[in-house]
């Protein structure tokens, strides 16, 4: 496909996003940026969160991963569903009752300043690493299939992407993101559906024939019974449940959108609606992956990087319309995760690290200037990490994202779980050491089990990490809270 035409598609879609941004960011203030003035319609948040949850990683990495892991991802999705129910019935009532802007403020009220700052720091670390991995995948595709044809180096491609994200989240914040996410989710889902349709047309299948071919391929196997494998169905289910609780319920980015709803009842409706739709959407991505694998096998195409299967087929083998649909879908999948990460990280740093809400002596103008500086600084950090990933990436990005989450969200899981299920206070000053030691112990444990027992924890390492943190808090408990 002509690269110049794809550039025009990219520019046109970006201008549409900026139009929505201009409308939603008028008369914006800090309250608009952080919580959308608590006026976001729940159904808009629910629909838009689909795009934010899936991201460019799901868009490419999940279909490509079917080549090696069949539908083993699906038990993890079922675990997600249970996790969302726990978030809606346990965590969100807590956040709304305490009227939180940053969810990590709970840790300060429950345990103290050191626990609070430790929790926020681990969120900032995890979200920064995970979000930039997602962005890296998208920038790589844009560079390989479009920008490289014009002699543009990878770092410039990353810079262009970051500047666009920076500009359209700079003012409106969460209010802008809620509405742009809805638009982008629509285009992303249409891209998946139309991609399946175009592949079926190319192969001469109707829907029934496609289903028959996918079943016959053996790729629809969902449950891995090998207990030693990372993809064992029970490990996947438990991982999905706790990954969901950690990466959504204990994540400022995802909860910030829920907290922008008018009240708890609306936020719960958002969460239940979103979680049900997400199961169907994830299955659709896996179905797309199976269709892609059958197509590549019959066409004699081979790939060492499974993340490139979908873009290569869509852009180089299915015709111009399919290529355009893919590019729009990719951008639609990329923007929600990138903009939400940048906004939530800015929020967490301003609220949790700089204590902006408590600085009553600061004028609104000064707060906005500091917010701008933090926003820009994170954007620069994103660019540097994207460039770094380009030199070291050697695995399906979705696996890397969940591996990072297993280490960095574990302390948050332990902190919140301990606070909710016990009445103990802890020695607050010891909590940063507990939070750092827990992932280190997990790394050593995982290495030892893999090397000597040939047993992989997979993403259940997140649960082990949380248990280490919980145990550390128990060891440093002081007395029961009054």
Image (tube, rainbow, N blue to C red):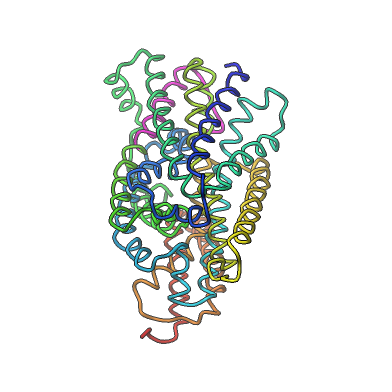
Q: Position of residue 197 (x, y in %)?
A: 37, 20
- In the image, 91 versus 154, the foreground residue is 91
Q: Does the segment drawn in magenta span residue 218?
A: no
Q: Magenta residues? A: 283-306
Can you say which quadrant of the picture contains the N terminus?
Answer: top right
Residue 291 falls within the magenta-colored stretch? yes
Picture coordinates of residue 299, whole percent (x, y): 48, 17
- The residue sitting at the front extreme is 27
Q: Main secondary structure of the magenta part?
A: helix
Say above or below: 163 vs 480.
Answer: above
Side of 333 relative to 11 (left or right)? left
Name the residue located 31 percent from the left edge and 41 percent from the top edge. Answer: 277
Location of residue 285 (image quadrant): top left
Relative placement, left or right, of 208 versus 23 is: left
Q: Position of residue 339 (x, y in %)?
A: 53, 45
**As drawn, 85 above or below 21:** below
- Of all residues, the one furthest to the top in this rendering is 204
Q: Is residue 316 above or below residue 168?
A: above
Residue sitting at x 60%, y 16%: 2
Residue at image location 41% in from the left, 18% down from the top: 198
Q: Left or right: 94 with respect to 5?
A: left
């Amino acid at each position: 496909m002509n690269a110049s035409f794809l550039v025009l598609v990219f520019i046109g879609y970006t201008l549409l996003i900026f139009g929505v941004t201009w409308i939603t960011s008028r008369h914006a203030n800090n309250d608009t940026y952080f919580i959308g003035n608590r006026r976001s319609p729940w159904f808009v948040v629910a629909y838009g969160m689909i795009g934010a949850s899936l991201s460019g990683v799901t868009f490419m990495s999940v279909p490509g991963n079917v080549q090696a892991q069949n539908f083993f991802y699906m038990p993890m999705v079922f675990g997600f569903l249970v996790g969302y129910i726990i978030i809606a019935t346990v965590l969100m009532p807590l956040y709304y009752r305490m009227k939180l802007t940053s969810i990590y403020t709970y840790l300060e009220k429950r345990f103290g300043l050191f626990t609070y700052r430790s929790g926020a720091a681990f969120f900032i670390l995890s979200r920064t690493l995970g979000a930039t991995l997602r962005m890296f995948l998208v920038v790589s595709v844009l560079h390989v299939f479009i920008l490289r044809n014009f002699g543009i180096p990878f770092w410039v491609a990353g810079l262009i992407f970051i500047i666009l994200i920076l500009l359209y989240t700079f003012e409106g914040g969460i209010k802008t993101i809620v509405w742009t996410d809805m638009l982008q989710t629509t285009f992303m889902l249409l891209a998946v559906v139309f991609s399946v349709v175009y592949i079926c047309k190319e192969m001469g299948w109707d829907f029934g024939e496609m289903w028959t071919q996918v079943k016959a391929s053996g790729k629809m196997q969902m449950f891995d019974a090998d207990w030693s494998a990372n993809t064992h169905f029970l490990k996947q289910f438990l991982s999905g449940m706790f990954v969901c609780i950690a990466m959504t319920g204990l994540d400022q980015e995802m909860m910030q959108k829920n907290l922008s709803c008018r009240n708890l009842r609306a936020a719960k409706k958002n969460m239940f609606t979103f979680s049900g739709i997400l199961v169907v959407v994830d299955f659709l991505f896996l179905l797309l992956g199976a269709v892609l694998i059958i197509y590549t096998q019959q066409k004699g195409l081979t790939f060492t990087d499974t993340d490139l299967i979908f873009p290569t087929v869509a852009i180089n083998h299915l015709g111009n319309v399919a290529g355009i649909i893919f590019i729009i879908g990719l951008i639609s999948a990329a923007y929600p995760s990138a903009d939400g990460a940048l906004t939530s990280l800015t929020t967490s740093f301003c609220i949790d690290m700089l204590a902006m809400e408590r600085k009553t002596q600061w004028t609104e103008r000064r707060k906005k200037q500091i917010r701008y500086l933090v926003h820009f600084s994170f954007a620069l950090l994103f660019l540097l990490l994207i460039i770094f990933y380009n030199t070291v990436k050697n695995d399906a990005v979705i696996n890397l994202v969940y591996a990072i989450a297993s280490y960095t969200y574990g302390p948050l899981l332990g902190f919140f779980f301990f606070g909710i299920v016990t009445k103990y206070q802890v020695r607050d000053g010891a909590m940063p050491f507990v939070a750092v030691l827990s992932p280190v112990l997990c790394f050593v444990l995982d290495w030892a089990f893999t090397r000597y027992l040939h047993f992989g924890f997979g993403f259940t390492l997140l649960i082990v990490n949380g248990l280490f943190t919980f145990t550390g808090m128990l060891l440093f408990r002081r007395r029961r809270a009054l």
